[in-house]
Amino acid sequence: MEAIVVNNLTKYFRKAYDKTLKGFFISLVKGEKRYKEFTALNGVSFQVNKGESYAIIGKNGAGKSTLFKVLSGIIQPDSGEVKIEGKVAPLIELGAGLSRDLTGAENIRLNCAIFGLDKKQIAEAYPKIVEFSELDEFINTPVKFYSSGMKARLGFSIAIHIDADIILIDEVLAVGDKDFKQKCYTKMEELRNSGKTLVIVSHSLKPLRRICDRALILEKGRVVDVGDINEMIDKYQDEKKKKKKKKGA
Amino acid sequence: MLAHLMKYKELMYFLVHKELKVRYRNSLFGFFWTLLEPLGLMVIYTLVFGYIIDLNKGIDPYPLYVLAGLIPWTFFNNSIRKGTKALSGNASLIKKVYFPREIFPLTMLISNLVNFIPAFTLVFIMAVAYGKTIQWDYLAMLPGVILLQALFTLALALLVSVLNVYYRDVEFIVNLVMRAWMYLCPIIYPISILYEEKSSELVQQFADLYFLNPMAVMISMYHGVFFADQGLPDKFGIPGFWLIYTVILTLILFLAAWYLFRRMNRRVGEVI
């Protein structure tokens, strides 16, 4: 059974030359193109099985974040299809914009509500989230006063407690202290064993070996290879070394 | 559409609650500002337009007339102005996680509606204090009028909120348009002023088209509750034809706004 099927996914970004109404009319009159196109994802296809842990690795600008956003539904692909079986919860960074002035407790409620939990479900999840995040004494403090580690802890706690089938994890794990990181990894393994699907986008490769089953290497918006996690990481690191040598020579 | 949004009942409740809390945070009078603000404006308009410029054409009492129009107008005005920023002001959330984005303009509307209803009871209190008789036929239509206005407001709010994501100019345009729009509504003057003999020919021609403005129709319906005995607003062609026109226009506008919102929503996640 597949949890995620991505078929020939392509995403262009439009880089507007001039983002004003005036600019719009001027270029409309002149008949010129109003934006430059940039291909962020180019014919990406892969499948993630149910209960699998899947890593997406690649350099900055490879299209990881774009892929992540397409999977969570924030942006829509230009062509190709994305089929997702079950509820998706992206692990989001807290503390920006609307949620900045809200307290930790309010943020928990807000984020649970965003993922469609009702009052009763929120009441059930709330104590678990607080407990896991270890933020008990700061839970009524506005999130803008949190350190980045505290925000990461809260964000991670929310994402894993809203009972989603698929959990998307961006590089947020880079923050947080060692103990909490360890706790997260343990929890992730636990989630995987309980049949949840994890998709992890990451720079730090070491922990991926422990958590993930398979991986996909992304380069300049294309899939380079898909396969077993250890093979993929070795391959990715080899290529990196080769390129460095070339540069050196 | 509704079933889909019902799933997010809890989220809407949260956002409305937060919006109301934030609005009156750190203010001494809190919720009373909802009542004090239109009352203050009423006093100003009565002094300036009722006494100094003398737009009070035999309307008695003029302050009640101003207030009865001003409070529905404030509801509309606030919803649209805040609605413009409903999406662009929540960019950080929209960029991070997906949920139906029409929730933002919708909760903005609901929180303004929550402010509007108690504020409008103020008009009734004032009417009783002035010893006005309330016109029951208009009162019976009032819930329908409020619903119609809410739908019309939501349609426009959806439109401007999504347009403002693409072009921030919309914010400035909306501010200006709303100012002009207020003067196109019978708030500080009665409609009869347009038909006066000393009015220029242009104004009289314009008077026949006056009710093309759906807000003028709706505000007149509010006036009807208190002023129908003074021949307002029936004398000048309301309700009947213009009322049906407003209903149809609102429905068409709403469907168009909904369609456009859906369409433009697709790229919101990347341009915001």
Image (cartoon, helix red, strand yellow):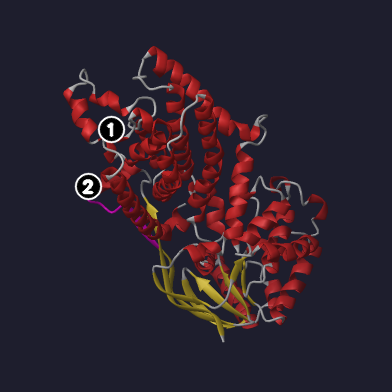
- Specify whether A124 is left or right of B216: right
Circle 2 marks a residue in which chain? A
- Specify whether A51 is left or right of B160: right
Whether residue A36 is in magenta: the answer is yes
Q: Position of residue B260 (x, y in %)?
A: 36, 56
Q: Is residue A62 visible?
A: no
The residue that appears at 65% across and 36% down in the rendered structure is B25
Q: Residues within 10 Å of mark 2 (few under 14, many from 20)?
A: few
Disc 2 target residue: A30
Give whichever of A102, B205 is nearer the camera: B205
Task: Name the disc covering residue B268, or none.
Answer: none
Q: Is residue B115 visible?
A: yes
Q: Position of residue B158 (x, y in %)?
A: 42, 51
Give whichever of A15, B210 is nearer the camera: B210
Give whichever of A140, B197 is nearer the camera: B197
- Image: magenta residue range: A30-38
Q: Give SS at disc 1.
A: helix
Q: Residue furthest bottom?
A: A1
Q: Amino acid at mark 1?
A: Lys
- Specify whether A247 is left or right of B271: right
Q: Position of residue B65 (x, y in %)?
A: 42, 27
Disc 1 target residue: B235
- Specify whether A143 is left or right of B165: right
- Above or below — where is B266 with respect to A137? below
Mark 1–mark 2 distance (CA, rounded to whole Å): 51 Å
Asked whether the beta carbons under mark 1 and mark 2 sit within 8 Å of each other, the answer is: no
- Above or below — where is B26 with respect to B10? above
